[in-house]
Image (spheres, rainbow, N blue to C red):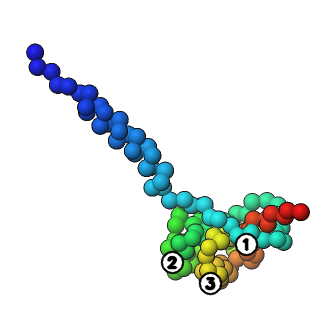
């Protein structure tokens, strides 16, 4: 009676499953930004209508959409009439490791698109007596 021994194949499959389970979270790009600390940070009352996140690689996220260049971001903001009609400020969350020149480019693009008020989001500085 000839039978195939599947025990080694099951061991390989379980090992591959463990490798994929460990590696999958590492392959996912983190969309969160590390906000800079500021001593005089205000508190936002309500959530604004539009949130721009500038990642450490310089790309800009609006929701789940990613924009790698200022030109594509400008086109998107010009197409969005909500930025002009929103009474609430546009919230800018920039990574702490970015050069300010990149943040300034995004601010200028928002201003040119018609944003009335821009808010730079920071983390409060830890005060220890």
Quadrant of the frame with the N terminus = top left
Does 124 sit above or below residue 4? Answer: below
- Whether residue 109 is visible, yes or no, is no
Between 95 and 88, the one nearer to me in the picture: 95
Quarter of the view holding residue 83: bottom right
Between discs 3 and 2, the one toward the N terminus: 2
Most distant residue in the front direction: 129
Residue at image coords 80%, 63%: 126
- Mark 1 and mark 3 residues within 8 Å of each other at the beta carbon: no
- Whether residue 20 is visible, yes or no, is yes
Q: Which residue is mark 1?
A: 120
Marks 3, 2: nearer the viewer: 3
Most distant residue in the top direction: 1
Would residue 1 appear left or right of 31 to someone viewing this image? left
Query: Residue 8: image x %, image y %?
Result: 25, 31
Q: Which residue is mark 2?
A: 69
- Mark 3 and mark 2 residues within 8 Å of each other at the beta carbon: no
Query: Residue 100: image x %, image y %?
Result: 65, 81
Would residue 71 appear left or right of 40 to someone viewing this image? left
Query: Residue 67: image x %, image y %?
Result: 52, 71
Between discs 1 and 3, the one toward the N terminus: 3
Mark 3 and mark 2: Cα distance apart in space: 14 Å
Most distant residue in the right direction: 129
Residue at image coords 50%, 59%: 29
Q: Secondary structure at mark 3?
A: helix
Q: Secondary structure at mark 2?
A: loop
Q: Secondary structure at mark 1?
A: strand
Between 20 and 69, the one nearer to me in the picture: 20
Quarter of the view holding residue 82: bottom right
Does 91 sit above or below residue 10? Answer: below
Residue at image coords 52%, 80%: 71
Would residue 114 appear left or right of 66 to someone viewing this image? right
């Amino acid at each position: 009676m000839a039978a195939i021994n599947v025990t080694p194949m099951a061991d390989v499959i379980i090992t591959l499953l463990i490798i994929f389970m460990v590696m999958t979270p590492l392959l996912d790009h983190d969309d969160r930004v590390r906000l800079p600390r500021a001593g005089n940070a205000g508190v936002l009352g309500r959530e604004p209508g539009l949130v721009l996140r500038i990642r450490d690689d310089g790309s800009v996220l609006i929701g789940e959409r990613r924009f790698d260049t200022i030109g594509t971001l400008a086109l998107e903001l010009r197409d969005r009439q909500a930025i002009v009609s929103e009474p609430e400020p546009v919230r800018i969350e920039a990574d702490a490791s970015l050069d300010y020149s990149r943040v300034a480019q995004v601010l200028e693009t928002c201003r040119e698109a018609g944003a009335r008020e821009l808010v730079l989001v920071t983390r409060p500085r830890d005060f220890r007596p």
